[in-house]
Amino acid sequence: MPAYHHGNLRATLLAVAERSLRRQGADQLSLRELAREAGVSHAAPRRHFADRQALLDALAEAGFARLDQELRAALAAAGEEFGPRLHAIAAAYLRFATEDAALLELMFTGKHREGGDRLVAAAAAPFGLMDDLIAQGQAEGVLEPGDTQRVGVVLFATLQGIATLINGGLVAPELLDGLVETAVDQFMRGSRRR
Amino acid sequence: MPAYHHGNLRATLLAVAERSLRRQGADQLSLRELAREAGVSHAAPRRHFADRQALLDALAEAGFARLDQELRAALAAAGEEFGPRLHAIAAAYLRFATEDAALLELMFTGKHREGGDRLVAAAAAPFGLMDDLIAQGQAEGVLEPGDTQRVGVVLFATLQGIATLINGGLVAPELLDGLVETAVDQFMRGSRRR
DNA sequence: GGGAAAATGTTGCCACAGGCAACAATGTAT
DNA sequence: ATACATTGTTGCCTGTGGCAACATTTTCCC
């Protein structure tokens, strides 16, 4: 336990920040408070994050990585069939998205400056998952052939939108499962091979 | 031009705030700066907005009112037929949503505290529009009968999600029109009377 | 009309945050 | 061992939000 050098302040700060984010939202997150909780002086975080926004960006990036993991896990658990996989990824996305509203906001809210590139890259992973899934559906002949991106983005957007409405308190959380059902169902009917 | 009493500081502050919001985002919005721009002392805004969040809430509420207006206008211009009306409301929503990303964030982001009720009420107007439209589609026999809310929320969510993806820089703005097309098309096919 | 009371603005203060610079301690490499 | 890079620390500055005390209008009621 080093006295002067913390050892892995960066990781500690991110962990503490994640907790703060979940509990109080990004607005209330204070670098100085994180430093206090990490038992370190108020200027120490600056060695690891150029400014407040840099830390928030790092949180968002980590969020995308975790989202990717969770979606992959859900897909893996859903087997090989397209239908169940689609349902699983949708449910997993919304679980993630509604479980930590502040993080989701951070991930999708347009507060990325130059660091936006990193975030866009991090977001590509989950996007790709959705894309691959659509491709599978097309290959199996369940979905009509076409641009996977186009339809994949719309599906992703639907899930994201549902999360926004629920997190914003505009739709009661109890309706979540039903909405996912409806969304997936509508998507299937709307893209089914004719 | 009263020297001491401004006359309608509240309205002025909201106007200045709207400009600031659009230009710098909600994070950078400072009550004191608004006061300066309004030519008033730093504590004056407090007489009209209990705190910073109250002003932001007021901005969001006004945003919903304006959104409602614009959607109504679009519907009115689209005639009586269901198809064109659906397309028009979708396009109008996304125009509004992508034209002022920071405002949209404020409107849907879950930063509403107790004042959330007011916002939810304000949001009900545009929601109702969507709902009525769905009902029309069902009445005309274009859409399959069913719970208008359920399908309306999903449609709303899709549009909102597309806006989020574009505003967040995760999808190129050039794709907007195509996505709206795809979304509306998918919705029609997914909800068409079978 | 006139005077109390409410509304609206002002000045001054405080605590706290972010950011910067100068300095200190610790690790690392030659 | 000694120079150099890393990582923390202390101290300072500016700006913000929020509060309280005071000043000026406006309104309302007799």
Image (cartoon, coloured by chain):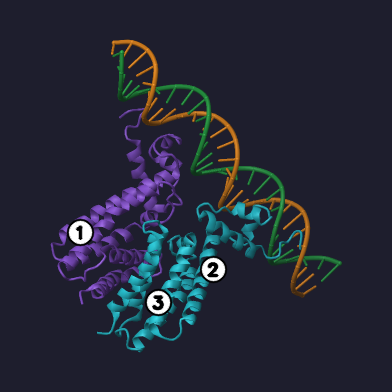
Chain colours: A cyan, B purple, C orange, D green
Specify the amino acid type for callout 1: Ala
Q: Secondary structure at mark 3?
A: helix
Question: In what quadrant of the picture does the N terminus of chain A appear?
Answer: bottom right
Q: Whole-percent x and y of residue B43?
A: 45, 35
Residue at 26 percent of width and 53 percent of height: B68
Left or right of A83, for residue A59: right
Going from the N terminus, do you reach mark 2 or mark 3 first?
2
Residue at 45 percent of width and 36 percent of height: B42
How far apart marks 2 and 3 lie (CA) works out to: 25 Å
Determine which of the numbered discs, if any, sits on residue A87 in the image.
Answer: 3
Q: Whole-percent x and y of residue A19?
A: 57, 59
Identify the chain of the residue marked 2, using the numbered disc in the image. A
Q: Whole-percent x and y of residue A48?
A: 62, 62
Whether labels 3 and 1 belong to a single chain: the reply is no
Whether labels 1 and 2 belong to a single chain: the reply is no
Few, some or many C-alpha atoms within 10 Å of disc 2 (few <14, some 14-19, many ≥20)? some
Q: Give the quadrant of residue A163.
A: bottom left
| Tag nearer the camera, 3 or 1 | 3
Identify the residue at the far bottom of this view.
A140
Determine which of the numbered discs, if any, sits on residue B62 in the image.
Answer: none
Specify the amino acid type for callout 3: His
C-beta proximity under 8 Å, tags 3 and 1:
no
Q: Whole-percent x and y of residue C17?
A: 57, 49
| Tag nearer the camera, 2 or 3 | 3
Determine which of the numbered discs, if any, sits on residue A62 in the image.
Answer: 2
Identify the residue at the far left of this view.
B80
Q: Secondary structure at mark 1?
A: helix
Residue indicated by mark 1: B74
Specify the amino acid type for callout 2: Ala
How far apart marks 1 and 2 lie (CA) works out to: 41 Å
Q: Secondary structure at mark 2?
A: helix
